[in-house]
């Protein structure tokens, strides 16, 4: 039986452990914390099958100036962080040009469209149906011009990819969301995505399914990974874990471990913030105020208010501008009450300059990469896990994997 260590117990790592297990591997899943407590905990909880075109770096001068002057709430940055993020951001800008971005979309869209089906293989056996809502989510717009442009774009995505949506005018939106406190121009209701009322708990239930099927969950330091002969070992609280394969699924911490083996990964780090609020009157389904980059999601813990992206590397101090603006926006839209937590949560999204996850073998025998899903680790974790497990088991790469391979990107 093939043995594997999966390093990292977020959505990507837990899904990897389950997929390898389904392919007959004996797997140890190792992390310093319980499953789903890091980046996978703090997201919007949307399995985004409509997200067929990933976030590209702005290309127009006006958009770049807007971001540089912090005129919106979608992006924040600090001058002292620029030397640490400039290189990967420049690659991100370059790879957002029309030709490379078209290649990215060709691969990315196929992953997104199958995401809910790949989650479904775990949701039912994990006993997690109570966490899943199959009613989509809404992007709302404050100006007629913004709404009309979004409606046209939704029609384009429906025509090209078959992504379903409903376009709601101001009256229709008000009827669908009776708790909404102000009139808006309209909304695009993306009807195919599923939402989760507790993302961290979903990861925990997937991990419990992995254990119930015979897998081993271990606490330990992934950075202790070392090559040992023809295999790999890492230190857990119960001693050394040895295996033929090691899968690095550490999200934003992956480049640090990879660097110990000579790999330089140009990751773009985007921090997000959220806070839960009490109250009875919020949106019926998750709602993104596009003009203010504020998402309000109904969660078991309360109304989760989420921000745009803060461009900063891991370990830097949190900033408050975006979450303060998002809180004000959310309270303008809905009668939210007191915050549930004393301080907002923050966590880092592991984004690659070409906007594609890194999935596949490295030049070290038995060392595999599985990270870099950007904003969509929660969505795409099971999909890329199934593809990686197939490659690790059979040695044959599904065509969907080919653009994701580290060797195809010059990183292995």
Image: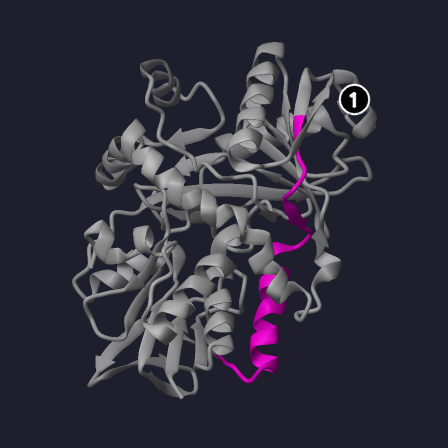
**Figure check: 387 above or below 266:** below
* Image quadrant in which you'd find residue 188: top right
* Image quadrant in which you'd find residue 339: top right
Residue 249, x across and y down, in percent: 39, 63
- The answer to whether residue 85 is magenta is no
**Figure check: 56 above or below 20:** above
Q: Residues within 10 Å of mark 1 (few under 14, many from 20)?
A: few
**Which residue lies at the image location 53% right of the left edge and 53% below the top edge?**
378
Describe the element under mark 1 as helix, strand or loop: helix
Would you say residue 38 is visible in this rendering? no
Q: Which residue is mark 1?
A: 172
Would you say residue 225 is visible in this rendering? yes
**Figure check: 337 above or below 395:** above
Nearest the viewer among 25 and 282 is 25
Q: Residue furthest left?
A: 262
**Which residue lies at the image location 63% right of the left edge and 27% below the top edge?**
328
Horizontal side of 411 relative to 115 (left or right) equals left
Residue 13, x across and y down, in percent: 45, 65
Residue 319, x across and y down, in percent: 45, 37
**Figure check: 37 above or below 352:** below
- The answer to whether residue 193 is magenta is yes
Residues shaded magenta: 188-217
Nearest the viewer among 230 and 24 is 24
Indicate how the structure is coloured in the image. one colour
Residue 300, x across and y down, in percent: 73, 52
* Image quadrant in which you'd find residue 151: top right
Horizontal side of 1 relative to 185 (left or right) equals left
**Which residue lies at the image location 59% right of the left edge and 56% below the top edge?**
117
Tell me the quadrant of the picture where the N terminus can be found: bottom left
**Which residue lies at the image location 36% right of the left edge and 56% below the top edge?**
399
Horizontal side of 19 relative to 232 (left or right) equals right
Tell me the quadrant of the picture where the C terminus can be found: bottom left
């Amino acid at each position: 039986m093939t043995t594997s260590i999966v390093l990292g117990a977020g959505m990507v790592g837990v899904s990897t452990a389950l997929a390898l297990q389904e392919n007959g591997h004996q797997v140890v899943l190792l992390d310093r914390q319980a499953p789903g407590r890091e980046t996978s905990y703090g997201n919007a909880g949307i399995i985004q099958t409509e997200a067929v075109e990933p976030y590209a770096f702005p290309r127009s001068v006006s958009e770049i100036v807007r971001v540089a002057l912090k005129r919106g709430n979608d992006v924040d940055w600090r001058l002292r962080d620029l030397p640490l993020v400039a290189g990967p951001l420049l690659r991100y800008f370059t790879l957002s040009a029309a030709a490379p971005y078209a290649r990215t979309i060709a691969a990315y869209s196929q992953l997104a469209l199958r995401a809910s089906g790949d989650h479904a293989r775990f949701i039912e056996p994990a006993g997690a149906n109570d966490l899943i809502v199959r009613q989509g989510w809404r992007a709302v717009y404050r100006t007629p011009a913004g709404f009309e442009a979004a409606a046209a774009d939704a029609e384009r995505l429906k025509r090209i990819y078959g992504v379903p949506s409903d376009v709601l005018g101001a009256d229709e939106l008000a009827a669908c969301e009776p708790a909404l406190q102000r009139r808006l121009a309209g909304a695009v209701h993306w009807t195919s995505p599923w939402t989760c009322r507790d993302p961290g708990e979903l990861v925990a239930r997937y991990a419990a399914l992995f254990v119930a099927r015979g897998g081993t969950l271990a606490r330990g330091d992934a950075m202790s990974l070392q090559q040992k002969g023809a295999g790999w070992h890492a230190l857990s609280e119960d001693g050394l874990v040895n295996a033929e394969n090691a899968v690095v699924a550490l999200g934003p911490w992956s480049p640090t471990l990879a660097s110990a083996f000579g790999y330089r990964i140009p990751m773009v780090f985007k921090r997000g913030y959220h806070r839960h609020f009490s109250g009875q009157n919020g949106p019926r389904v998750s709602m993104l105020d596009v003009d203010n980059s504020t998402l309000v999601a109904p969660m078991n813990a309360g109304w989760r208010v989420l921000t745009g992206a803060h461009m900063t590397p891991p370990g830097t101090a949190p900033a408050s501008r975006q979450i303060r603006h998002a809180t004000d926006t959310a309270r303008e839209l809905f009668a939210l009450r007191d915050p549930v937590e004393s301080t907002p949560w923050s966590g880092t999204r592991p984004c690659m300059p070409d906007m594609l996850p890194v999935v596949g073998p490295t030049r070290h025998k038995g060392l595999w990469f599985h990270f870099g899903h950007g904003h969509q680790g929660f969505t795409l974790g099971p999909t890329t896990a199934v593809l990686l497990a197939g490659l690790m088991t059979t040695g044959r790469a599904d065509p969907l994997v080919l653009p994701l391979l580290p060797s195809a990107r010059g990183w292995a």
